[in-house]
Image: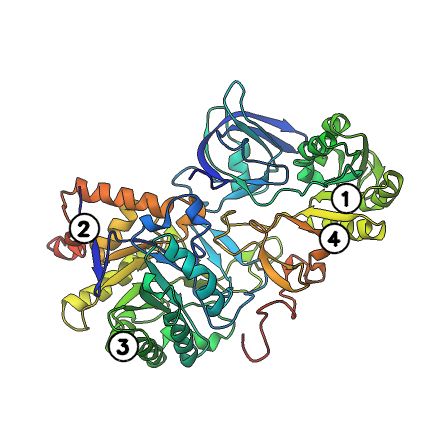
Amino acid sequence: MVDMSTTLAGATLPNPVMTASGCAANGKELHRFFPVSDLGAFVTKTVMRDPRSGRPTPRMAETSSGMLNSIGLQGPGIDAFCEQDLPWLAAQGARVLVSVAGNTAEEFGEVVQRLVASPAWPCVVGVEANISCPNVANRGLVFACDPVSSERVVQIVRTRVPEGVPVFAKLTPDVTDIVAIADAVLRAGADGLTMINTLLGIVIDTDLLRPQLAGVTGGLSGPAVRPVAVRAVWQVTAAMRAGTIPTAPVIGVGGVRTGADALELVAAGASAVQVGTATFNDPSAPRRVLTELEEHLARHGFTRFADAVGVAHERMAAL
Amino acid sequence: MSGSGVVQVAGEVVANRRVGAYHHLTIVAPGVAELARPGQFVALAVGGPTSANLLRRCFSLHKVKASGTYGGTLDVVVAAHGPGTQWLTGLSTHDAVDVVAPLGRPFPLPAEPVPCVLVGGGYGSAPLFWLAEALRERGCHVEMVLGAASEDRLFGVVEARRSADGVTVTTDDGSAGRRGWVSDVLGEVVDRTGAGVVYACGPMGMLRSVTEVAQAHGAVAQVAVEESMACGIGVCMTCVMPVRGTDGTTRMVRSCVEGPVFRGDLVRWDAIGGGITRVPEDAVGAPRPGGH
């Protein structure tokens, strides 16, 4: 038996496996395959202030070991989320990490304010600020590519979320130096980081000789991006270990399909792991990854999950 | 989990045979038949557990059998046109395939025994024979209209003659039945039978025409759409379509959970065409000038 519990900036979870935002809707669909309360936390689809239709279709293109998506943050808006989705998750006993976004920094704050006022708020174990979604129609609003706009969002969100509930900033790998962005959001008050969001890509339909997605660009996810996620987690946690940026827990996400994939992110420094695109392939994937991760940890002789976090930094081959 | 209306099971292929331009697969999938109804679909994983093709391929259930030599089975009709469907059509007896089914909403059946016309384009006819049986059990007079580009792309003409009270066949090239489209003959079949409901499955363009003809001849169209899906279970948000609700409001709805069967007159065909489905300006949450 491995003690699978993990603590993320004060939030203690029974295990480190979560869904990934936008890959699990808001729970009801996956609950037909496994109890959502089995997971360390359930990460909701990014919620914005107003209802959003999302983008035209095609919104999806399959790629080698991955996919490109351009959903455009379709969702019912924060009020419907608080009335319907959050109470349902609370009733299942799920621990919820709510992903929020806004068209402006102020709108992030408004979304959080209404979220905190929800009667179901006690099931929320953290807020994930989606500052890096590349799908928003207005291309100027990818906050996470700019340290100053990232800081501003994080400051507003942190102010509105009650003390004791951690705020995570979800970062994009589509930047020159992800450590600099991590440093900026942590100094602005983020309690932790989620890495990585999708990578921007384009697929050309070779029959029609035009972009396959109606929205032209989309976010690349799936096992194809896993090495990028492992690299991002590694670089940022290495900087924390070196003392050059503040120390904070990292949630690893990107291309996790198996327990071994999850262990890569953990060994690179992630204190929790999200399972995203693999859920489209296997609706049981998040639950299965938990079982497999525990088996891998036991095989390595770990008695506590926490002891495996970042272990690869200590085991580098001497050159 | 039990009571959830859907199962995920490790399926096993027990038959894979060529039928015209298509492949007809029978897969052992215990638990599906007891839950499934005509119009629902199955999401199959392709390429095995380490496949580079992650997205599930969705097929309407051609038929299901609760028990038999192999335990419960389901049948699907597959056209090989990409790497996933090529993998599926290349499967041999005893090969494994991960099954999630049944999914989506079935064809609604009329409360009264009204005459019905069932229209299938190409292998879109796959779920209609099972539907025809269910309708005839309720005392409905059932006619089928099957159309395709050419004779080899028709599916189930022989089966249709068993399942329905009358069958009309059309092909674009005239290689079987009447030359032309299903929509060319549908009106007269609806008029002759006095049909109250037209059920249809096939390409979007055909479903739009069927809806228009049905409306013009006083019948309600129930259409099963073939939107491309990544998951089939309602989590990926890729298979959305603009559909009017009973409140008159258009929303971008998931065809996998709110469909695949929609009332044809509620689908916003005006937003669909050229391989793209746009978001109508009056849809809930549609982008507004100056930002979303």
Name the residue: 64% across, 33% down: B22
Identity, as a three-letter code, of the amino acid under mark 1: Val
Counting from the top left corner in percent of width and height, residue B114 is at 79, 39
Question: Mark 4 and mark 2 in contact (Cβ < 8 Å)?
Answer: no
Are dots 1 and 4 on a single chain? yes
Q: Is residue B52 visible?
A: no
- Residue assigned mark 3: A184
Per the model, the C-alpha gap separating discs 2 and 1 is 59 Å
Look at the numbered disc 4 and give the secondary structure of its residue: helix
Q: Which residue is mark 2?
A: A305
Q: CA distance from mark 2 to mark 4?
A: 55 Å
How far apart are labels 1 and 4 at the CA level?
15 Å
Residue sitting farthest toward the front: A119
Tell me whether marks 3 and 1 sit on the same chain: no
- Label 2 sits on a secondary structure element that is helix
Q: Position of residue B278 (x, y in %)?
A: 63, 64
Residue type of the residue flagged with mark 3 = Ala
Q: Residue at x 54, y 74 (%)?
A: B292
Residue neighbourhood size for the residue with mark 1, other residues' Cα within 10 Å, grouped as few (<14), some (14–19), many (≥20): many
Judge left or right: residue B167 versus residue B252. Answer: right
Q: Separation of disc 3 and disc 4 at Cα?
A: 53 Å
The amino acid beneath tag 4 is Arg
Left of A197 or right of it: where is B93?
right
> On what subunit does the disc labeled 4 rest?
B
